[in-house]
Image (cartoon, grey):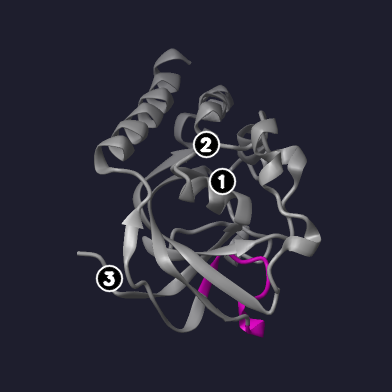
């Protein structure tokens, strides 16, 4: 059963949120922000709102077809407010890293096979694998839902900083929400990604 409200938000690039909202991808790849506890990302919640961020977005880190999605600085929303328009539920998490296999080639192959399944530039996932290599890269599968009436709230000081999770001051009403993808389409895409990742273990 879907909840009526949510008090947890997750920070992500606005352009990535747009890709998730359009069904262009169903995964995000994370290791953690610079202010994360132990500098290591933890999946603290399996249901959350997306908190759009603009500061670290970079056209060079996107495939050419998606660079036009980046908004100009003057077109970005008022930074004193945040609008929630996408809700997500985690369905699966696959760790990509040398700690499981003992072989860095496995992690590198996994990063390479993910490239058709996201909007980021070639090599983006590989760089994430090599940053802090002793920590696995989390491929997080997300079932996303569009909020029909997006909710805007003030940004308070405690929402700032390079942390992934934000505990909001109050619950945000979800109202009517619609799945970005039909169940069958989502399951098919997820199966394709899982099969591609599994194949890297079989061939390395």
Q: Residues within 10 Å of mark 1 (few under 14, many from 20)?
A: some
Query: Disc 2 on helix, strand or loop?
Result: loop
Horizontal relation, residue 4 to residue 122: left or right: left
State which tag comes first along the sequence, 1 or 3.
3
- CB of mark 1 within 8 Å of CB of mark 3? no
Q: Is residue 151 visible?
A: yes
Q: Which residue is mark 2?
A: 97
Q: Judge whether 5 appears above or below 124 on screen.
A: below
Q: CA distance from mark 1 to mark 3?
A: 33 Å
Q: Which mark is residue 3?
A: 3
Q: Which mark is residue 135?
A: 1
State which tag comes first along the sequence, 2 or 3.
3
Tell me the magenta residue range. Answer: 156-166
Q: CA distance from mark 1 to mark 2?
A: 7 Å
Question: In front of the other: label 2 or label 3?
Answer: 3
Residue 176 on image: x %, y % = 32, 67
Q: Residues within 10 Å of mark 2 (few under 14, many from 20)?
A: many
Query: Disc 1 on helix, strand or loop?
Result: loop
Q: Is residue 30 visible?
A: no
Q: Judge whether 82 appears above or below 124 on screen.
A: below
Answer with the quarter of the image where residue 174 lies.
bottom left
């Amino acid at each position: 059963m879907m909840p009526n409200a949510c008090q947890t938000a997750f920070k992500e690039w606005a352009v990535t949120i747009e890709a998730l909202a359009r069904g262009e991808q169903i995964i995000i790849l994370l290791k953690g922000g610079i202010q994360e506890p132990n500098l290591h990302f933890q999946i603290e919640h399996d249901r959350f709102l997306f908190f759009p961020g603009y500061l670290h977005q970079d056209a060079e880190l996107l495939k050419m077809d998606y660079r036009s999605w980046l908004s100009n600085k003057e077109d970005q929303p008022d930074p004193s407010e945040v609008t929630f328009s996408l809700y997500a539920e985690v369905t699966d998490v696959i760790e990509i890293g040398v700690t499981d296999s003992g072989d860095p080639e496995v992690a590198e192959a996994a990063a390479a096979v993910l490239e058709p399944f996201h909007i980021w530039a070639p090599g983006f996932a590989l760089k994430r694998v090599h940053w802090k290599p002793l920590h696995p890269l989390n491929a997080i599968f997300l079932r996303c839902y569009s909020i029909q009436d997006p909710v805007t709230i003030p940004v308070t000081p405690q929402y700032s900083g390079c942390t992934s999770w934000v505990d909001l001051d109050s619950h945000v009403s979800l109202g009517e929400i619609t799945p970005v993808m039909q169940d069958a389409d989502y399951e098919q895409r997820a199966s394709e990604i899982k099969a591609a990742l599994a194949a890297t273990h079989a061939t390395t």
